[in-house]
Amino acid sequence: MTQKGSGRLLPAWAKTAIGFVLSLALTGLGLLAITFFIGRVVPIDPVLAVVGDRAPPAVYEAAKERMGLNDPLILQFVHYVAGILRGDFGLSVSTQRPVMEDIARYFPATLEMATLGILIGVVIGVPLGALAAARQGSIIDQVIRVIGLAGYAIPAFWLGLVGLVLFYAQLKWVAGPGRIDIFLDGMVPPVTGLLLVDSLIAGDFESFTNAFSHIILPATILGFFSLAYIARMTRSFMLDQLGQEFIITARVKGVPARVIIWRHAFRPIRVQLITVIGLSYAALLEGSVMVETVFSWPGIGNYLTTALLNADMNAVLGGTLVIGAVFIAINKISDALYRILDPRAR
Amino acid sequence: MALLEVENLKVRFPSESGMVEVVKGVSFSLGQERLGIVGESGSGKSMTGRALLGLIPKPGVVTADRMQFDGIDLTRLNERAFRRLRGARLSMILQDPKFSLNPVMTIGEQIGEALAFHGRMSAREQKQRVLKMLEAVRITDPERVYRLYPHEVSGGMGQRVMIAMMAVLEPDLMIADEPTSALDVSVRGQVLEILDDLVQRTGMGLIMISHDLNMVARWCDRILVMFNGRVVETCAAGKLGEATHPYTRGLLASLPRLDETRQTLPVLDRQSLGGL
Ligand SMILES: Nc1ncnc2c1ncn2[C@@H]1O[C@H](COP(=O)(O)OP(=O)(O)OP(=O)(O)O)[C@@H](O)[C@H]1O
Ligand SMILES: [Mg+2]
């Protein structure tokens, strides 16, 4: 009776939604706890960063008291969380701007490049992997195996340099490092921070094509790595499905090969693919440091590297927090899609 | 003319030590009747059935002196022509609905698919045919079952769905490859009854593959006994008692009977069959 009673009190979707929000909040809190903890254990003295290393002990102590560092740890954590919730990540020592402002400036550059990269990876990688599985042992299959291996073996910075030399310096097909040519920089009013989107909003076609010719090479290089991974996984998921009994059932019914591949074998693997794509997307977002460095891309990877080298603790923690939040978000989205797409998980 | 004539059917698979024959020259013919194929695991029953449908997996090779279905030479059919035959005129019920139904397609969609690739009909008409077929396999609320996914139905109902899917186009020949061995004992009888009903109503030929000599003897007109890739005995179901081959005699002897008080069941004496 109690079971049924509570069941009637809340519809199933509401329970799912509440569970979703709760787990999101818990994971977020966990992430905050981790960054807070990192902030306390690294051998960087936040007080020194503010007062300088030649300040007299009295000034040092006063600053420490003012920064709340003499409070009990739990109170410090509460203040930390409250600050984050207000969007206050502290000041960056190296840029002298609020970390929040820096992130709003750098993160969209990374997001834009990674998103284009994952699009390339999915649009090419999924059909390629499916094709390889459908024609196991064929030339296409071999080519995809090689691509998959290359994705493992080739370092991103090397591919970036070769790409720049070939397509920028030699062939002049694309623009060079940076997000946009200097004479166009700052011409597009920022709305989303994504140059391709903002230039379209502003109707500035010149900026759009310029930004596109800047982003296409690094995005393709990122896309190559996700393509290699996605194609490899798609191939192995598809092979698994094509060996199942229900494929024989479909053949007995007289279903053509093309339909067997896309309807019978591909449909069941969509949920697995979502997880793979989510992982790959997260990897591009947090792992684009190499490509960002080679292409002087003003993204979060570059920002984090600089912050780390300067012992800029607030910036490091802020950047880590953002990347962690993105990771959680991608995870939750693929989880939700999973529930929608797999009838067994509903 | 017989519905199906098979002469010297062989199925081989390449292996490290050369070609391995798993079906070693099987011959039989079939009219509008029920033929039972019995034999132990690995004796080549399923491979015989699948060869008839052109469904031997890739490196496998099928040869036959003759494999004729209703005047059509199956040995010379390409995949396209085979596909037109499958589902529509030649069909097969697989063993376990847990694995043989697509987990992410609704039951209605899966049965409808059998119709969709053989001739045109409107979506409405297709749905009506599917619902009627679900009724024919004694599903009482076809509208509801139409929308369910395979994991939402029981094994017995899943197998009835399988039968509906494979019989919806009223094929001339149905191969049932152990249609009840994955099911709970309590629903086996019902599933067999439904199959029997269909065969009687549509007059289709039936090949029933099974381990279960008793069941096959009860449900079929004629019986083939297979052992190690060969047919070792062919007889009318009623004349099973007069079987002469030592393997069949061995099988019969190891069947438990109600009116006896044996302490241990005799097992097959494999030594004496070694030469097969
Ligand atoms: N793809 C394959 N490659 C090689 N050998 C195979 C392959 N598929 C089946 N076989 C072999 O063919 C033989 C006959 O298999 P088959 O499935 O016809 O047996 P069966 O009589 O149906 O047995 P069961 O009662 O267990 O279903 C087996 O020994 C099996 O190992
Ligand atoms: Mg079998």
Image: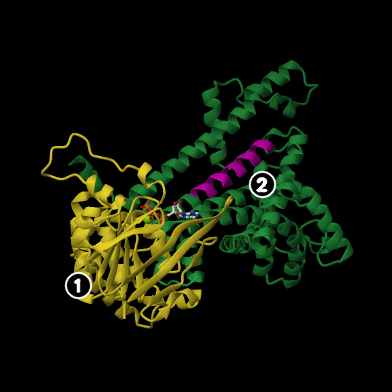
Element class at badge 2? helix
A336 vs B116: above or below: above
Kindly give the residue lying farthest to the left in the view shown. B259
A309 vs A144: above or below: above
Which of B273 and A29 lies nearest the eye of the viewer? B273
Crowd around label 2: few <14 · some 14–19 · many ≥20 (10 Å): many
**Image hue for chain A:** green
- Residue at 44% from the left image edge and 60% from the top image edge: B24
The percent position of residue B127, horizontal first and vertical second, equals: 30, 75
Quadrant of the image where one finds ligand 2: bottom left
- Residue at 79% from the left image edge and 53% from the top image edge: A160
Ligand 1 lies under 8 Å from the Cβ of mark 2: no
Which chain does the yellow colour mark? Answer: B
The percent position of residue A299, horizontal first and vertical second, equals: 72, 50
The amino acid sitting under disc 2 is Ile
The amino acid sitting under disc 1 is Gln
Crowd around label 1: few <14 · some 14–19 · many ≥20 (10 Å): few
Asked if the residue at tag 1 contacts the one at tag 2, i.e. Cβ–Cβ closer than 8 Å, the answer is no
- Residue at 55% from the left image edge and 35% from the top image edge: A32
Chain where mark 2 sits: A
For mark 2, what is the residue? Answer: A103
- Residue at 49% from the left image edge and 77% from the top image edge: B76
Element class at badge 1? helix
Task: Locate the N terminus of chain A by quadrant.
Answer: top left
Which of A28 and A240 lies nearest the eye of the viewer? A240
Which stretch appears magenta?
Answer: A316-332
Disc sitting over residue B200 in the figure: 1
Q: Is residue A278 magenta?
A: no
